[in-house]
């Protein structure tokens, strides 16, 4: 094998390995991911079956407010953080026009409840925890992602039936989208860092979100260099 060819192949492999290293390193750092086909990560905010999810909300800058009364055993705070492999920390915020202090509420029981919004009045948390009209919830990702789909549940913690599913408004970087609450997959992925879901005529809970990484410009550049190196090496091999 000519020296030039070996050098080009070596450079191409180094470039490709440099692209793949961040994904391998991230996978070793955490095991909180469900990837049936290895192409996306699903963050589940609900309790699957009778087990508590691995991504139980951890309050960011605030203590857990659900400590007594009707909400005991649940998780709620002004912001809740969930650790993901794909995007790092995912921070959720609640909005409510009727409450001076809205909090994000994570139901851990019954199964298939998910994230909602509740009002903090003094030391009391409201018992209405679904996302209602004039309310909303935001997911802020530490790194840009492609959102491939959402899972929504109704106030009875059931999936919405296709024939009677409400529409849910989504705002991403000042772009507006209309989602069908029964569709768990989007027709095309939506890229961004902050995703805000608004409440409407029908109340709901956010059960899960499916995300995929958005390659950085440097990653694309390294991949391009690697492919160019492979092409040059093959061309020189044919000439020799």
Image (spheres, rainbow, N blue to C red):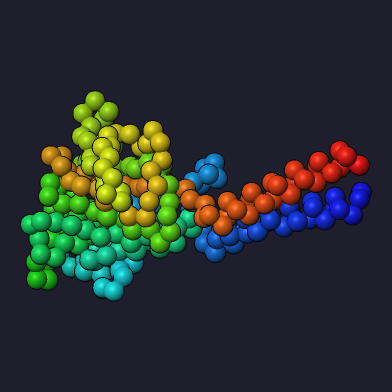
* Residue 125 shown left or right of residue 195 in the figure: left
Q: Nearer the viewer, residue 194 or 68?
A: 194
Q: Residue 74 versus residue 8: which sits nearer the camera?
A: 8
Q: Is residue 201 above or below residue 66?
A: above
Q: Nearer the viewer, residue 115 or 168?
A: 168
Residue farthest top in this picture: 163
The C terminus: image quadrant: top right
Towards the viewer: 191 or 40: 191
Q: Is residue 74 among the parts visible in the rendering?
A: no
- Lateral position of residue 145 relative to residue 123, left or right: right
Q: Position of residue 208 (x, y in %)?
A: 35, 47
Quadrant in the picture for residue 219: bottom right
Residue occupying image coordinates x 7% and y 57%: 98
Task: Name the quadrant containing residue 201.
Answer: top left
Q: Position of residue 133 (x, y in %)?
A: 12, 46
Residue, x 23% and y 42% (percent of image)? 169
Q: Where residue 162 sits in the image (x, y, percent)?
A: 27, 28
Q: Position of residue 120 (x, y in %)?
A: 13, 65
Q: Is residue 130 above or below residue 74?
A: above
Residue drawn at point x = 49 percent, y = 58 percent? 85
- Could you tell me if residue 172 is visible in this image? yes
Residue in the picture at 52% in, 52% down = 215
């Amino acid at each position: 094998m000519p020296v030039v060819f070996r050098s080009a192949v070596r450079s191409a492999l180094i470039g490709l390995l440099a692209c793949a290293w961040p994904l391998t390193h991230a996978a070793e750092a955490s095991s909180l991911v469900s990837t049936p086909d290895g192409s996306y990560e699903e963050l589940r905010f609900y309790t699957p079956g009778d087990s508590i999810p691995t991504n139980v909300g951890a309050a960011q800058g605030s203590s857990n407010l659900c400590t007594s009364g009707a909400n005991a055993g649940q998780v709620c705070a002004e912001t809740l953080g969930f650790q993901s492999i794909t995007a790092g920390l995912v921070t959720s915020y609640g909005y409510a026009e009727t409450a001076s202090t809205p909090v994000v509420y994570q139901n851990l029981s019954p199964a298939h409840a998910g994230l909602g919004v509740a009002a903090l009045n003094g030391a009391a948390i409201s018992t209405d925890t679904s996302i209602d009209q004039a309310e909303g919830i935001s997911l802020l990702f530490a790194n840009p992602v492609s959102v491939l789909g959402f899972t929504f549940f109704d106030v009875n913690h059931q999936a919405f039936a296709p024939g009677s599913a409400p529409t849910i408004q989504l705002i991403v970087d000042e772009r507006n989208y209309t989602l069908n609450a029964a569709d768990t997959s989007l027709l095309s992925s939506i890229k961004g860092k902050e995703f805000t879901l608004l409440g409407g005529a029908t109340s709901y809970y956010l059960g899960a979100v499916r995300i995929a990484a958005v390659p950085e410009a440097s990653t694309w550049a390294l991949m391009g260099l690697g492919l160019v190196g492979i092409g040059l090496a093959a061309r020189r091999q044919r000439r020799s």
